[in-house]
Image (cartoon, rainbow, N blue to C red):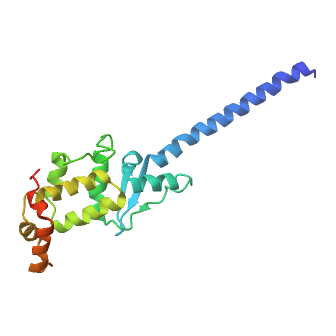
């Protein structure tokens, strides 16, 4: 067999090998993309929540963990543990992340009061004080900054325009200052009583 006759055979074999590799690669691509399309989160009390990767990336903690685990082919197969967040608060946070998956809220907190969307404000306002504190800690732990800031704005709205005594009564706080200490603080920080309401 001449070299001219062998050359087309070699080219044909190379083409078939390339096609086989292409088919193999394309068949594995959907499986890998399916694995990373969603992630599962495990609460501190062992409840599982599923969320899209896009929505999860709105949490700085989840973003860091997914990027780290993504280097391991099986890293995202198991639920990601949220050891400091129980199921009640993890459900609220995953719902928030999903609602705002395609919403650009802001990258850095704007100066001054934050405009809280009505639906978010109503949901936060329906919580008890203890539930608000728990949710605030959970959002801070997970790095869901927009949700955390919405909660902080709600708290700020509650104390706006109130005297220290009214704030203590609203949140059932004990005054741990003696009358002498409180008088001294008022004298030193006399400017605070002259701040505008807004």
User: Residue at the spot x=19%, y=68% of the render?
Assistant: 130
User: Is the N terminus in the top left, top right, bottom left or bottom right quadrant?
Assistant: top right
Q: Nearer the viewer, residue 190 or 94?
A: 190
Report the number of discs. 0
Q: Nearer the viewer, residue 3 or 100?
A: 100
Q: Answer above or below: position of 117 versus 1.
A: below
User: Residue at the spot x=13%, y=74% of the render?
Assistant: 184
Q: Position of residue 31 (x, y in %)?
A: 52, 45
Task: Using the rendered view, name the quadrant where residue 27 is placed.
Answer: top right
User: Residue at the spot x=25%, y=66% of the render?
Assistant: 134
Residue that protrudes farthest toward the right in the picture: 1
Q: Answer above or below: position of 101 versus 3.
A: below
Give the side of residue 17 with respect to residue 104, left or right: right
Q: Position of residue 185 (x, y in %)?
A: 14, 71
Task: Using the rendered view, name the quadrant where residue 103 is placed.
Answer: top left
Q: Nearer the viewer, residue 55 or 28?
A: 55
Residue that protrudes farthest toward the front in the picture: 188
Task: Using the rendered view, name the quadrant where residue 152 is placed.
Answer: bottom left
Q: Nearer the viewer, residue 28 or 61?
A: 61
User: Residue at the spot x=91%, y=22% of the render?
Assistant: 3
Q: Position of residue 5 (x, y in %)?
A: 88, 20
Q: Position of residue 154 (x, y in %)?
A: 16, 55
Q: Answer above or below: position of 191 versus 116.
A: below
Give the side of residue 4 with respect to residue 172, left or right: right
């Amino acid at each position: 067999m001449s070299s001219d006759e062998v050359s087309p055979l070699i080219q044909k074999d190379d083409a078939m090998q390339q096609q086989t590799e292409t088919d193999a690669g394309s068949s594995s691509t959907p499986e890998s993309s399916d694995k990373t399309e969603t992630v599962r989160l495990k609460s501190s009390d062992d409840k599982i929540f599923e969320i899209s990767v896009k929505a999860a990336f709105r949490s700085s903690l989840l973003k860091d963990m997914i990027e780290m685990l993504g280097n391991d082919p099986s890293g995202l197969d198991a639920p990601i543990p949220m050891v400091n967040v129980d199921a009640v608060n993890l459900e609220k946070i995953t719902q928030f992340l999903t609602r705002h998956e395609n919403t650009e809220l802001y990258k850095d907190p704007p100066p001054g009061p934050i405009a809280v969307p009505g639906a978010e404000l109503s949901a936060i306002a329906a919580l008890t004080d203890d539930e608000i504190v728990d949710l605030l800690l959970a959002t801070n732990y997970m790095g869901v900054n927009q949700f955390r800031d919405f909660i902080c704005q709600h708290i700020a709205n509650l104390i706006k325009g109130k005297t220290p005594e009214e704030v203590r009564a609203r949140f059932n706080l004990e005054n741990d200052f003696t009358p002498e200490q409180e008088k001294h603080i008022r004298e030193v920080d006399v400017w605070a009583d002259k701040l505008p309401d807004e």
